[in-house]
Image (cartoon, grey):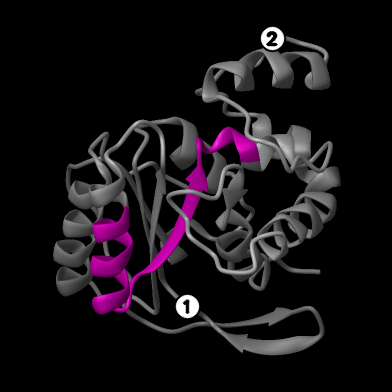
Amino acid sequence: MHDKEGGSQTRNRGYLERKVANRDLKFERFLIVCEGEKTEPNYFKSFPIPEEWLDIYGIGDNTLGIVRKAILLKQEGNYDQVWCVFDRDSFPAQKFNRAIELAEKNNINVAYSNEGFEIWYLLHFNFYDTAIPRREYKRMLSQLLDHRYQKNSETIYEELKSRQADAIRNAKKLLDQYPSPHPVRDNPSTTVHLLVEQLNRFIAQ
């Protein structure tokens, strides 16, 4: 799979059939537009899915810029699912909320994290329901992984794969802690698991 950050690309607009989990699922093309240039794209391109099924961009922009880019790319391609992946970070609350609203208005899914994407990694190990400053993520992950965590890791998917089911359960449990979800305030929280579950549908069992 390729981290597509510009340049020409071949678009396969055909449909394929593939046996998945003892069912026949029609091939779906994904567009995934990420805030980070490497961290998130490296993770998602590691899913064992044919590369022609995924267009992954790491654009290094703010929340609204990511959604606007996704809208443009969606118009250019023939996609079944379009996702934006971005973090709360220190972006103004208004921009974060507007980005989610703009995505929903344009039928684009959002995999957000508050404060940062690495909360998804941390949930592979433990359930966390108290705010964690993103400056702490690297230290915590280094301890849990038993080696120094690198943000742009190309191996993190494989390192965490065996714990992914735990992460999904923890992410769902975490969202359940908020009776009235408010992404900009819900720290910690993440919806990355929603995208992960969709991608997992197309991994051969």
The quarter of the picture where residue 110 lies is bottom left
Estimate how packed mark 2 is, as few (under 14), some (14 to 19) or many (20 or more) residues with alpha carbons within 10 Å: few
Mark 1: secondary structure: loop
Residue type at the position of mark 1 = Glu
In depth, the one of 198 and 51 nearer the eye is 198
- For disc 1, the marked residue is 28
Q: Does the segment drawn in magenta span residue 16?
A: no
Looking at marks 1 and 2 on the same chain, the residue that comes earlier in the sequence is marked by 1
Q: Position of residue 157 (x, y in %)?
A: 67, 39
Residue mark closest to the camera, 1 vs 2: 2
Label 1, label 2: how far apart the Cα atoms are: 36 Å
Q: Residue at x 56, y 40 (%)?
A: 43
Residue type, mark 2 in image: Arg
Quarter-of-image position of residue 91: top left
Q: Which residue is mark 2?
A: 148
Q: Check if mark 1's residue and mark 2's residue have beta carbons within 8 Å.
A: no
122 to the left or right of 79: right
Instruction: Give left or right: position of 142 versus 112.
Output: right
Q: In the image, which disc is placed on residue 149?
A: none
Q: Residue at x 50, y 35 (%)?
A: 116
In magenta, the rendered stretch is 97-119
Q: Where is residue 201 shown, x and y percent of the image?
A: 66, 73
> Within 10 Å of the Cα at label 1, are there few (<14), some (14-19), or many (20+) other Cα atoms?
some
User: Observer-nearest residue: 99 or 74?
Assistant: 99
On screen, 123 above or below 100?
A: above
Identify the residue at image location x=63%, y=34%: 131
